[in-house]
Amino acid sequence: MSALLLLLVVAVLLTLGLAGGGKGRDLGHLVAVDMPSGEKGETQAKAAKAQTVQKSAATPTEAKVQSETPPDPVPVPVPTASYIKLSREEFAASDIAAIGRRRAAEAGAQAAAAGSAGANTSSTGGGPGGARLYNAQWYREPRDAELRPFLERGAPPGAWAIIACQTVEHYHVENCQEMEEYPQGSGLARGLRRASWQFLVWPPRIDGKPQVGTWVRIRFDFTKEG
């Protein structure tokens, strides 16, 4: 239909040109050609569609950014406090102040016992080199098993022996010397001296102060056979 319409327009123009050929400088007449409304509308629709396609191609498509809602935070469980159940007696035993008082009381009892031992200690004189000799008080009396290896011939009932020793730290003695024994010649004093490294005695106390380094007189009575 468009081609036919175009041919029609060309024919009309040619006719008009031929009709005005001998009129000299006559420029001719303007001819208005009315196109059918249906065809004109179709042509305009095609032109508008072409413009829309060009505009769509020229304008980049905007990407729609879809906002994502962040997930809810996961709650962290709070650790529960753990407690150790104590009885009244256990709680009292764990009291630091009570422990300090108890240790102070024990130390006081030991000091009192040491003072008592010192108060009962008397000087006898006649120590090695003329030194003052104090009667010893056992801190721990030796056991038979500790003495037996040093008693070569045993000890009859009623036997005894005396040695003199010098006190040192931690209730021990050293430099022991033989003094007396019964029966005479039994060797009990010698055996007692050889076993003295195991002896533990209280050092003499003067005015409540232990006199470490002083000499003590140790007597051991054998009440049964060795």
Image: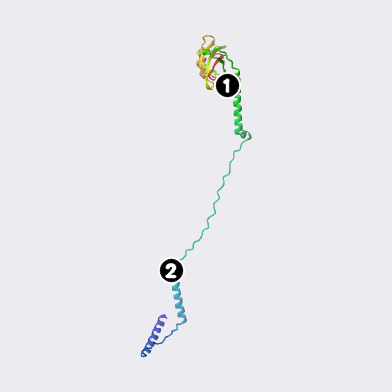
Mark nearer the N terminus (2 vs 1): 2
Look at discs 2 and 1 and give the one toward the viewer.
1
x and y percent of residue 169 in the render? Answer: 53, 22
Compared with residue 1, is residue 109 higher up or lower down, i.e. above or below?
above
Q: Which residue is mark 2?
A: 58
Q: Residue furthest bottom?
A: 22
Disc 2 from disc 1: Cα separation = 112 Å
Q: Amino acid at mark 1?
A: Lys
**Residue at left offset 40%, top offset 84%:** 9
**Residue 132 tag number:** none
* Element on which disc 2 rests: helix
**Residue located beneath label 1 in the image:** 209
Residue closest to the far right = 88
Q: Position of residue 127 (x, y in %)?
A: 53, 13
- Residue extending farthest front: 207
Q: Position of residue 30 (x, y in %)?
A: 42, 85
Question: Residue 159 location, x and y as percent?
Answer: 56, 11
Question: What residue is at 60 percent from the left and 25 percent from the top?
Answer: 108
Mark 2: amino acid? Ala
Label 2: few (<14), some or many (≥20) within 10 Å?
few
Mark 1 secondary-structure assignment? strand
10 Å crowding of disc 1: few (<14), some (14-19), many (20+): few
**Cβ atoms under marks 2 and 1 closer than 8 Å:** no
Colouring chosen for the image of the structure:
rainbow
* Residue 29 falls in image quadrant: bottom left
- Say which of 167 and 95 sits in front: 167
Identify the residue at image location x=60%, y=28%: 104
Q: Quadrant of the C terminus?
A: top right
- Residue 222 image-quadrant placement: top right
Q: Quadrant of the N terminus?
A: bottom left
